[in-house]
Amino acid sequence: MPIGLFALTAGAFGIGVTEFVIMGLLLEVSADLGVSLQAAGLLVSGYALGVVVGAPILTIIAAKLPRKTVLVGLMGVFTVGNIACAIAPTYSLVLGARVLTAFAHGTFFGVGSVVAADLVSPNRRASAIAVMFTGLTVATVLGVPFGTWIGQSFGWRATFWVVGAIGAVAMAALALWVRADEPGFTRSDWRKDISVLSRRSVLLGLLTTVLGYSAVFAVFTYIAPLLTRITGFPESAVSPILLVFGGGLVAGNLLGGRLADRHLVPTVLGTLVTLSVVLGIMTFALRSPFWSVVSVGLLGASAFATVPPLQAWVLSRAEGAGQSLASTFNIAAFNLGNAAGAWAGGVIISHGPGLGAVTWIAALIPLCAVAVAASAIRLDRPRMPSAELFSTAATNAPKGEECP
């Protein structure tokens, strides 16, 4: 893998830390800023809203700029946003800084996925995307616990200073190691790019992503009460168990990328079915301490095994104009799925069968995603030969070239 890809991974790591670390610092933030815990929680949802709404807008604005310039600029926005969080004297300014930082999130992963795919040969594009997203998974496993420890030991503002420094290092790495666009590279026209959303296969691909990640976060959002109230673990055991989840994320992410490089569409369908099976098994596994830990690791693996194939699939459906915009919309779809899943899980707990039913109801959602994906595949069949439809290399190869 080229060194530029690891510069993208460094940026993904910093973004992953800043997105999730606030969850471990809500008590410190609420006490320091004099706001309720519920208000502090809006720093999480405000960030997600910034990704969903801001990322496509920023991608359109930056459409005519060189992609390397866009990535370096986005990491600059990310760095400034985290420093602003560190020095903001009021809650409103911290919230505003979080939203500003979120604008960089979706566009970075959207444009970065396209750049990562272009850095390697066509038959390794899904793996390249997976390597970039490894930065996000490692942030979940290592960066967030470390950032939480810094915030609890030296104050929550210290965490954002450290993340700002990570952003500055990533920005320098992107400037040094990501190659510039080829001389003949054509800049995007947002008016043509937006037309990608008129393709039903692209829209169905985005809906598949929303449904898949709704299932994941319907369960993961409430993993602590599931482990303590159903399995019977003490609260102190939750953090170590989440390390198992994080290890599953890393393994599933890389495995999903490798499988998608060989057979893209079967991997999309297979990972979604696997996710459904794992969620269904969790319903019974949570009754046993040993098997509950195993199932949490499998949930992490099956959840992130879907990411590279879904991202690569949307890119292949948006072949030509609009790839960066479609990729960015897919990142927004992941975040929309996060929010929808958390809401759905809350409804099941508060107004439905209760906490014990969250896993088996969530297991039904990926099956809906499989049905949507199958509809998109049927739309693609008339215009693509079977071999081209099912191969990542083929769907991304330049016209007129033989696929490896």
Image (spheres, rainbow, N blue to C red):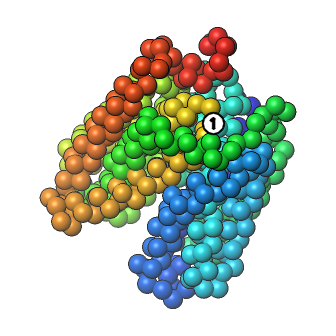
The image position of residue 110, as x and y in percent, is 60, 46
Is residue 118 placed above or below 107 in the rendered structure? above
Q: Which residue is mark 1?
A: 321
Q: Secondary structure at mark 1?
A: loop
Say whether residue 49 is left or right of residue 359.
right
Q: Residue at x 58, y 54 (%)?
A: 56
Q: Residue at x 36, y 50 (%)?
A: 214
The image position of residue 393, as x and y in percent, is 58, 20
Q: Residue at x 68, y 61 (%)?
A: 78
Of 257 and 299, nearer the camera is 257
The quarter of the displayed image where residue 322 is located: top right
Residue 332 visible here: yes
Say whether residue 72 is left or right of residue 200.
right
The quarter of the displayed image where residue 280 is located: top left
Q: Quadrant of the C terminus?
A: top right
**Hey, which residue is sitting farthest left in the picture?**
353
Residue 15 visible here: no
**Hey, which residue is sitting farthest bottom in the picture?**
34
Is residue 334 placed above or below 19 in the rendered structure? above
Q: Residue at x 63, y 47 (%)?
A: 191
Crowding at dot 1, Cα within 10 Å, few <14 / some 14-19 / many 20+, comes out as some
